[in-house]
Amino acid sequence: MESMTDDTPPARTHVRGSLDRDRVLRGAIGFADREGIEPLTIRRLADHLGVKPMTIYHYVANKEAIIDGMIDLVFDEIDRPAEDGPWRAGIRARASSLREVLRRHPWATPLMESRTSPGAATLGHHDAVLACWFRSGLPLELIAHGLAVVDAFVYGFALQEAALPFGDRPGDLTGAAEEIVVPLPEGEHVHLARFTQEYVLQPGYDFGRSFDFGLDLILDGIEAAAAR
Amino acid sequence: MESMTDDTPPARTHVRGSLDRDRVLRGAIGFADREGIEPLTIRRLADHLGVKPMTIYHYVANKEAIIDGMIDLVFDEIDRPAEDGPWRAGIRARASSLREVLRRHPWATPLMESRTSPGAATLGHHDAVLACWFRSGLPLELIAHGLAVVDAFVYGFALQEAALPFGDRPGDLTGAAEEIVVPLPEGEHVHLARFTQEYVLQPGYDFGRSFDFGLDLILDGIEAAAAR
DNA sequence: CACGCTACTCGTACTTAGTACGATGAGTCA
DNA sequence: TGACTCATCGTACTAAGTACGAGTAGCGTG
C-alpha cells in the first residue's frame, strides 16, 4: 500500500517549495520553545521540518545566522510603545510585552542583547523604545539610566523566571521546591528552608507577582528623580 | 638540548599530581574568562592544563559537572552580606559584589540561576542573602519582592554589560558603536542614531554608572514601600 | 512537445566535540 | 624487589556543523 512509487530512492519527500527562510526560522523557534536551544541542532531541525540537513543551508548561511534570525523574529513579537500617549504608559506596556515574549521564548533571554549584527526588527524596536523615552522630556542622562535599569530588570526577571522548575503555571512547584530543599543538610541553610516553607510553598505563590511590583517601583523612582 | 630523555613516547608529560578537581575547575574558569564559554571544550581545556582530554574525566564526571563546579566557584567569589549591620548596606554590598564578579566572569550570568543541582557555595550564598533580608524585619512578601527585584536587576545589568562591544574600559567603544550605527539606512533609526551620537559617543560615557543609580533607586523604593 | 536551465534537494564525507573502554606505566608499600 | 593502585592516556565510537558536488523536478522557450 506504500511501496508503489517506492523503487530506487528511499522516499522521495522532496516537496519543493515547502520551505523558505521564514519557515526555517519559525521552525527553529518552535523547536527551541519546546526543547530548549541546546538540543536545537541542524539535524534535528531538519527532521522537524521534514527535510534533510543540508537543505537548510539553501536558506541560511550557517547556524549562527539561524540564531540571528530567530532573535530578530523574537524582537518583532514585542509590542513597541505607541507613538503618542504618556511615555510612562508606553515604557510600561513595552516592558510587560517584553517579559511575556521572553516567557514564551525562555531560551532567547541571554541572546537578546548579545548578538552582533542585529536584524531590522531589532533595530526598529530599539529605535521605537528610544523614541518613547525621548518624548518624556527627561534629561538625557536620566533617560539613559531609565533605559538601562528597566531593561536590566526585565531581562534579569526573565532569566530568573526561565530558571523556575515548573513550566509556567504557578502553584505546581511544590514537588520541585521540595526536591531541592528537603535533601539539604539538617540545620544548614535555615533561612533558605524557612523562606521556602513559609513563602514559596504557600498556596497561591506566584513568582511573577514581583514583576509588576518591581516595574512600578522603578518607574516611580525615575519620575521621582526627574521631579528632583 | 631538548631531545635527551625524549626517546620512545612523544613527550612524557605525565606529571602526576599536577591536577586535581579544583585545578580543573579554575583552569576552566580562566579559559572561559578569556575565550568565552562556547570555545571551552574538553580538548582545549586539556591543552590549557597541559594534559590529554581523557585525563580530565578522572576528576569530573562530564562536562556538565564542570559547568556546575565552575558556577559554584563563582558563587563562592561573591561577598556575602555581613551577619550584622543594617540590612540595606548588606544587600547593597552584596549586589555590588555580585556585579563585579559577573563582570569578571561574563559567561556565568545566564547560568547562575539555571543550574539544577546547586553546589554548597551556591546554597550557602543564597542562605546568607536571605538571612540579611530576614534581618530587615520587612514583611515576608516585601522581602520576596525585594529579593526578586534586586537580583533581577543585577543579573540583567550584568547581561547587558557582557554585551558591550569593548572589553571593560569605558571610552574605548567609539569604534565599535560607530561600526554598528554608521551603516544604518539613512533616515531610519533616528532616535538610535541620536542617542548614540549625543550620549554614548560622548567622552566620559560609562554604562556602568547606571548600576549605582538603579540599585539605589530600587533600595529606596523598597524602603518607601516598607514605610507605607 | 522536446530540450535545456535553474532552483532546490540531498548524499557523502570531513572536522570537531564528548566520552566509553581498557591499556600503560609510575610510584608506593610491604 | 615485586605486586598493587591509580593517574594518565590511546583508541575509537557517536553526534554535530557544514563543504562539495550530484541529482532532479518543473518551468520556460523554441
Image: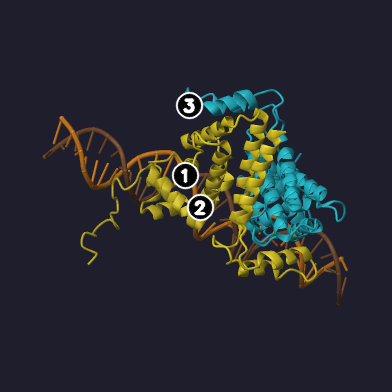
Chain colours: A cyan, B yellow, C orange, D brown
Q: Is residue B34 above or below residue B217?
A: below
Q: Quick check: can you spot residue A56?
A: no
Compute the Cα span from label 1 to label 3: 20 Å
Q: Residue at x 58, y 33 (%)?
A: B133
Residue A111 in the image, given as x and y percentages of width and height: 64, 52
Q: Is residue B109 above or below residue B171?
A: above
Q: Mark 1 sits on what residue? A: B77
Compute the Cα span from label 3 to label 2: 29 Å
The residue under label 2 is which amino acid type? Answer: Arg
The residue under label 3 is which amino acid type? Answer: Glu
Chain ID at mark 2: B
Q: Residue at x 70, y 23 (%)?
A: A203
The residue under label 1 is which amino acid type? Answer: Glu
Decide: few, some or many residues near mark 2? Use Cα within 10 Å; few <14, some 14-19, many ≥20: some
Q: Quadrant of the C terminus of chain B?
A: top right
Q: Mark 3 sits on what residue? A: A188
Side of B173 where A124 appears, left or right: right
Decide: few, some or many residues near mark 3? Use Cα within 10 Å; few <14, some 14-19, many ≥20: few
Asked whether the residues under the numbered discs 1 and 2 touch, taking CB atoms below 8 Å apart as contact, a structural biologist would say yes
Quadrant position of residue C23: top left
